[in-house]
Image (spheres, rainbow, N blue to C red):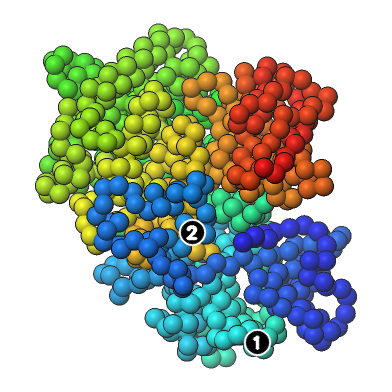
Amino acid sequence: MKRRGLLLGGLAAIGARAGVRGARAESGLRSLAPVHRPDGVWEVLEDCSTPDGALVFRGPGGRVLTLGRFMEGCARPVGRAPYCGLAFGELAYAERDLLAERLLAGGEPDPAAVRDAAPPIDTRLASEEPGRILWTAFVGPPDGDAVMPLTPAGNTRNWHVERVVPELARGSAVVAARREGLLGGALPIVVKQFPLGPGCYWEVIVFAEVSPEHARLVPTWQRMMLVEQGRATRVVYGGSYVPFGPFRAAPDEAAFNGALLRCVDRWHGVLAGTLTPVLPEPDWADFARHAFVKEAMVRRGGVWPRYGVVDRDYEGPEYDGFQDIFTASLLANLEWGRFDQAKAVLDNQFDDFVGDDGLVAMRGPEVGQTGLTLALVARYLELTGDDATVRRHKARVAAMAGVLTALHDQALALPADDPGHGLLHGWSESDACLFPDPSVWWKPYFGNSAFAARGFRDLARVWHRIAPEDGARADDWARRAGALAARTEGALRASIQHDGAPPYVPILPGVRERFRESLARHRYSEQQWAHRVYCEMLQSGILPPDLEAATIDSMRAHGATVMGLVGNLTPPSHAQRDILGFISYGYAQALLRNDRVEEYLLFLYGHRYHAHTRGSWTAAEVAGLRGELALFCLPAQMTVPILLRWALLYEDDRAETLHLAKALPRDWFLSPEGVQVAGIPTCWGRVSYILRYDEATRRIDVDLTLPSAAPRETRLYVRLPSSYRHGAPVEHGSSGTAFAAFGVRIDGTAGGQRKFSIPVARI
């Protein structure tokens, strides 16, 4: 499926031309009430001839805004056996990732097969739990203090669709069969379509007022439209509240259209500066960019973090300092060129959450995420060049590093024959502090030391820019990074259990009990959050390639993944097998680093289709595979943007190499729409490239722009479908380009523009 988001241009796509309202209605278009603004009058047109038709604003000076609909079905798949034909109890209890094996059996996974491998989340809705209302999406203004939840039928807390259409009452088959999406690509304008019969459906559009009178209020706008055979036969408009006698009337069409245009303008401002890749399937770019829209709705004032929304659990202020909110957000915003937002997030964290002692104002500091924070501070500096901001926070950055050095010193003081000698002890998961005896989880998890090593290494590399007078501290961090990396590798190799195929990689040194056994036997298992430890030890990038590969193989074979995604690990059960929506991008990064591209794509597809609601794209912290109601968390929403960015351009952690198009789907390389990305930030500078296939000449034309301080090597991956092969590149005035097995290798440090073509032939 292809998605049309917000486009600038003419109206040829919907065949509009000046004329009377009746003439437009005959062709499937309808002319709506115009919007009068200080810049002039905006004409409003809508295509009802198809459920995916566009709503168009045409304004002064020829400005045109085309808001496309991209709709996804929310109903459970019909005509295809779920779980790839496996019994749910079998795949749930199995150690091996049976779903991944089936979905990867033919090589690169089919996204439609991944989509239909399990029911969509939020389709198996139980009765409302105490303290939890039934909601699957939300809207809100940017930089506000609150959001408004939406039910599957499109109800807000104030305005209910069944008052207009009784068939849309909760639990009805019509609601279950709905299609859902967003109007305008990445914008938070939720569209729900409820089929009534061939060519007949009700549509509900809901969005939040972007200029509310009070920050704590979330005024909303609603429109319900009955479409029959391509014509709008009934339209009802609603606001935040139902009409109240002669004192409060329902909004009219003109008011709704004016609010909608305000909404579009304001959200354009929020997304300004965000990468805008042009892809053969545009919905992927919209999906990724929508994460930053969600973030702007969730963060109070656009900056203050919240883990979740609506529900007291996760929205409560005790969750605000959760380190994963900060690390996932900072990484995603940096990777997508959103440097202003990255600075705001960094300032908020170190001004309001990190104390002078280096600890985070959160109930349970996480050792691994503390190391990741130090590494991300270094990445912020290298991408933005903003020395002043990091210098302002240097005392607290150093104090945070001091927490890890103190833990390292404690570990070095242990007896040499202690399995945890030299490995950082401490909580890996914040929730450890909630249990009767948190010391159960004060352990030398490999992820703690791996991320500490990465944090020390990266911070030491840039510390001379922050505190040139403090070279001794940077030298100490660099020394500790090397020692921790070596100790982690040695302890991990010594702890691997070779009595299985493949060998089992544990999360702790010296343990013989595997995590599934431990979870089943102990009420409070020291391996309760094994999924986090695996992801952090892999994301750190400090393990040698063979250990990374062994860890990935062990996770797939011994119960840590499902459908190619990291699982939320619980005692083995025939009734439950859950996906972890956040944290897990570290596992995916290791897949990419180890050239396991098919598995990386399976992870990307699985996360999109089974850790998010369909169409409205609300991310789940944890998602069941039976369609259960899931809880939203902001770090999970940041996962797909991070993964798509790395698929387009990835910077090798181990060598000075740029990897371009390494994990793009094979079909994209032969799409006439091509792939185009401009201004991707890297530590060397901005990178742009265009890949466009010319069917007539049977070649892929490449236009690549590298920064002046180019890396030692740039690799362009040309992954064609199995029935095609590519030849050596044909130069167009550039040099230093060579053919390689993966595609094209560009050597040398000279930047600038490179142009060449890659011949393509059928096998």
Secondary structure at badge 2 equals helix
Q: Nearer the viewer, residue 103 or 423?
A: 103
Q: Nearer the viewer, residue 396 or 165?
A: 165
Looking at the rendered structure, the kind of residue marked 2 is Ala
Q: Earlier in the sequence, mark 1 or mark 2?
A: 2
Secondary structure at badge 1 equals strand
**Residue that lies at the very extreme toward the bottom in this rendered image:** 245
Q: Nearer the viewer, residue 170 or 78?
A: 78
Q: Which quadrant would residue 591 be assigned to in this image?
A: top left
Is residue 284 visible to us here? yes
Q: Residues within 10 Å of mark 2 (few under 14, many from 20)?
A: some
Looking at the rendered structure, the kind of residue marked 1 is Glu
Residue at (36% x, 15% y) in the render: 482
What is the C-alpha distance between the residues marked 1 and 2? Answer: 32 Å
Rendered location of residue 114, percent (x, y): 47, 56
Which of the two marks, 1 or 2, is nearer to us in this view?
A: 2
Location of the N terminus by quadrant is bottom right
Residue at (60% x, 44% y) in the render: 722
Rendered location of residue 381, percent (x, y): 54, 26
Q: Residues within 10 Å of mark 1 (few under 14, many from 20)?
A: some
Q: Is residue 196 above or below residue 304?
A: below
Is residue 367 visible to us here? no
Q: Is residue 196 above or below residue 631?
A: below
Location of the C terminus by quadrant is top right
Q: Is residue 252 above or below residue 128?
A: below
**Residue that lies at the very extreme toward the front in this rendered image:** 763
Rendered location of residue 188, percent (x, y): 57, 62
Task: Report whether 695 appears left or right of 313.
Answer: right
Disc 2 target residue: 113
- Which numbered tag is attached to residue 228? 1
Residue at (82% x, 71% y) in the render: 15
Rendered location of residue 661, percent (x, y): 61, 38
